[in-house]
Amino acid sequence: MRYLFFDIECVHEKNVQYMLSFGYVITDEDFNVIEKEDVLINPNLPFSLTDVGVPVYYSIREILNSPIFPDVYNKIKELLEDKSYYVIGHAIINDVQYLIDECISYELDGFNFEYYDAQLIYCYLNNETRRVSLDNILVSYAIERSNLHRSDEDAYHTMIYLKSICNQKGMTLKDLIKDTKAIPGVIKGKETLEPFMLGWIHPSCNSIEFKQIALNVGLTYLTNSNGGKLNGKTFGINSKILYHDLNFSLWLINQILSNGGSFSLSLDVDYFIHEYNDCPYQEKLSINESWCGDFIDIEELYNYLGINEEDVETLSKDYFERLVSQEVNIK
């Protein structure tokens, strides 16, 4: 088993990112570097280095003398789709989106691979409630940073801090991924699901930001049903319920969908589910003349759907994990 770390630098043009470089590092399981390269890419549009938003290691001349994305597409695709690699990056969801944008722009086939986010592993292990930048993580491990925003160097430094974590814990990266229950992101064609940490779904996680990521991924595994007691009705859920235990939340949402209803994260709903008259939006919505919805206590919903409240804990136990494990290769 080998690890492939990668990073991408871009230029911004009308809210679209165009790639300037694809940097990667391949290592063995002991983090010995096998291959390291920075693939420069001509964005094929007029730009200045001020459009990039961050300092770039290379000159405009070097970038403009480089191949355009279609000319390096096969090389990048072969690397990322090699199933002998664990693909890893820091804040990697952004880089995956850059690849999707390039494929759309040049009308190329999309990519198909799984990938892990080193940033999320670090945040999970250190009980962070928000994302932490690469620079700040390197500082926390007293790792000197060089060649700022050169893609292969950013990929290399991502590898270095993961190596530090593994050394501290006395385990391989493969074992670290398994131990932390890191769920890989998946890109299929021109669509992707974000990576996340399975531990975020439990009440012990107090980060709404990270729970929102996990919830959004979980929702993609659910499907609507036609007909049923809730047919045509849209439901919202009190955030105190929604983000407490995602095993329960996803199970509850599935009950709504399987009975013909739909779920929304907005307040534009027919019914807002709360618990024991505890709803932070109740007063706000009640005085909003344009809102035509109503509130429903969670016990009322159970009774209407014929759900025995005593069975809920058993029915929802590990629901998220069971659902995701059917769809994603949890290594």
Image (cartoon, rainbow, N blue to C red):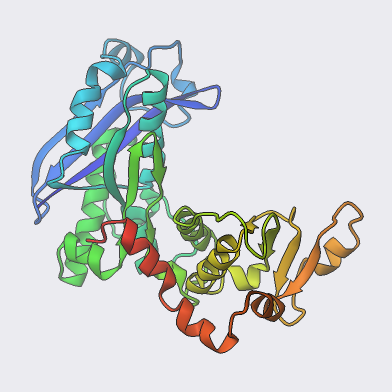
Question: Does residue 27 appear anywhere in the picture?
Answer: yes
Q: Give left or right: position of 322 versus 260.
A: left
Q: Quadrant of the C terminus?
A: bottom left
- The residue drawn where x is 37% and y is 61% is 324
**12 or 48: nearer the viewer:** 12
Residue 327: x and y in percent read 33, 56
- Does residue 49 lie above or below 165 as drawn? above
Residue 200: x and y in percent read 44, 67
Q: Give left or right: position of 148 versus 17.
A: left
**232 or 72: nearer the viewer:** 232
Residue 167: x and y in percent read 17, 65
- The residue drawn where x is 33% and y is 33% is 8
Question: Does residue 144 appear anywhere in the picture?
Answer: no
Q: Residue furthest front?
A: 227
Q: Give left or right: position of 46 versus 183.
A: right
**292 or 281: nearer the viewer:** 292
- The residue drawn where x is 33% and y is 22% is 108
- Does residue 320 lie above or below 153 as drawn? below
- The residue drawn where x is 33% and y is 17% is 59
**117 or 222: nearer the viewer:** 222
